[in-house]
Image (cartoon, rainbow, N blue to C red):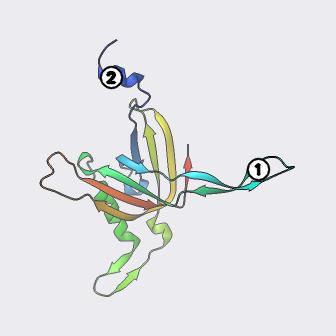
Amino acid sequence: MSNDISDLMKLSPLRSNRFSLTIPRLTNVKYTIESVDLPDSGVSTFPAQFDNKSPTLIPYAANYGGNSISMVFRENEEKNSPYLSVLEWLDKVIIRDHGKRTYQIPYFSDIVSDMSITCETTNNKQVYKIDFIDCYPISAKLSSLDMNARDAYVTSTIVMSFAEFTVS
């Protein structure tokens, strides 16, 4: 057996996957995600007992783990910064008039966009794709910058709100 790392990766069930983000509003740029907290799905149940048998759980509603998603990007690996792109979009969510203390909230359809996250193997085979409907940014943050961190890289954390999602 060869000691080549690529041979070991083929055998390992823990191969690394790539996650990419596509947002049509951001001129169809595809960003590589370092990490992402995806929403969870579940079913609410209540206990019931029939004919003196052991209790069973009856499902009555679908649960979704919130309506926001947090993503971390490496800023120095992208030609177009996800942070700057989303920050520009975020400024359009609430329009501030700096001379006065007033805010304008645009029409919902003017600030939302669909987006998708695709999980691919190292061979570019799609494992799954999650489509998020009616998304808009709610926060964008750069990591702390430190002159003493010689082997660190700059990351950005972006949180998006969404109305619903589908998995395919």
On the image, the x and y values in percent for residue 90 come to: 36, 67
- Number of numbered discs present? 2
Residue 16 % position (x, y): 38, 34
Q: Residue furthest right?
A: 51
- Where does the image place residue 137, in percent across and percent down from the top left? 40, 63
The residue drawn where x is 76% and y is 50% is 55
**Which residue has dot 2 on it?**
6
Residues at circles 1 and 2 in contact by the CB criterion of under 8 Å: no
Q: Nearer the viewer, residue 31 or 60?
A: 60
Residue at figure coordinates x 42%, y 31% from the top left: 14
Mark 2 is surrounded, within 10 Å at the Cα level, by few (under 14), some (14 to 19) or many (20 or more) other residues, namely few
Q: Secondary structure at mark 1?
A: loop
Quadrant in the picture for the N terminus = top left
Q: Nearer the viewer, residue 56 or 89?
A: 56
Task: Indicate which label's residue lies in the foreground, 1 or 2.
Answer: 1
Quarter of the image where the C terminus is located: top right
Above-or-below relation of 53 to 112: above
Residue 59 appears left or right of 102: right
Residue found at the very far bottom of the displayed protein: 100
Q: Quadrant of residue 84?
A: bottom left
Q: Is residue 19 visible?
A: yes
Left or right for 59, reference 157: right
Residue sitting at 26 percent across and 57 percent down?
143
How far apart in space, not on screen, are marks 1 and 2 (Cα)? 51 Å
Instruction: Kindly identify the amino acid type of the residue bearing the numbered disc 2.
Output: Ser
Which image quadrant is residue 99 in? Answer: bottom left
- Residue 163: where, in percent of width, then height? 54, 61
Helix, strand or loop under label 2: helix
Q: Which mark is residue 55?
A: 1
Residue 31 visible in rendering? no
Amino acid type shown at disc 1: Pro
Residue at coordinates 34% horizontally, 70% vertically from top-left? 91
